Image (tube, rainbow, N blue to C red):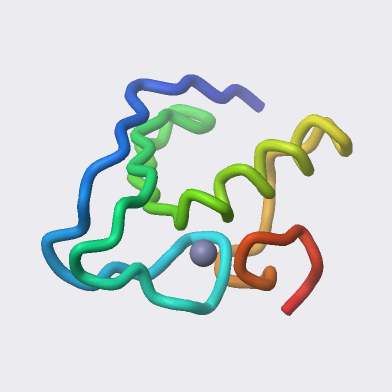
């Protein structure tokens, strides 16, 4: 398993996007985190609510585990939705 971060930016959404972490949408005009990365040789392009990215980062640190179920957590937390 390998993970490589290619870029991480915090753009303003020009349209609605699904957040990869929680079931809620990132709304047009909302500042969010756009992550481009490579995971086991596959390119990933994820968008996160800022607070979801923080929650994910802290849970990755805690569990040393970067695999997760998309859209499975409550917004801004690492609890199951
Ligand atoms: Zn979210």
Q: Is residue 64 above or below residue 30?
A: above
The residue at the point 56 percent across, 25 percent down is: 3
Q: In which quarter of the image is residue 42?
A: top left
Q: Is residue 33 above or below residue 14?
A: above
State which quarter of the image contains the C terminus. bottom right
Residue 18 as seen in the image, left or right of residue 16: right
Q: Horizontal and vertical percent for residue 16? A: 23, 72
Q: In which quarter of the image is residue 2?
A: top right
Residue 25 as seen in the image, left or right of residue 16: right
State which quarter of the image contains the N terminus. top right
Q: Horizontal and vertical percent for residue 9? A: 30, 32
Between 37 and 29, the residue placed more toward the observer is: 29
Q: Horizontal and vertical percent for residue 23? A: 53, 78
Between 64 and 59, the residue placed more toward the observer is: 59
How many marks do you count on the picture?
A: 0
Residue 31 as seen in the image, left or right of residue 55: left
The residue at the point 38 percent across, 38 percent down is: 35
The residue at the point 50 percent across, 32 percent down is: 39
Q: In which quarter of the image is residue 27?
A: bottom left
Q: Horizontal and vertical percent for residue 66? A: 69, 38
Q: Which residue lies furthest to the left in this view?
A: 14
The residue at the point 56 percent across, 46 percent down is: 53
């Amino acid at each position: 398993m390998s993970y490589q971060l290619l870029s991480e930016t915090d753009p303003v959404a020009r349209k609605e996007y699904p957040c990869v972490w929680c079931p809620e949408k990132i709304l047009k005009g909302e500042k969010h985190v756009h992550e481009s990365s490579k995971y086991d040789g596959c390119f990933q392009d994820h968008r996160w609510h800022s607070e979801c990215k923080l929650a994910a980062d802290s849970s990755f640190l805690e569990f040393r585990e970067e695999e997760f179920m998309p859209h499975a957590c409550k917004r801004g937390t690492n609890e199951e939705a």
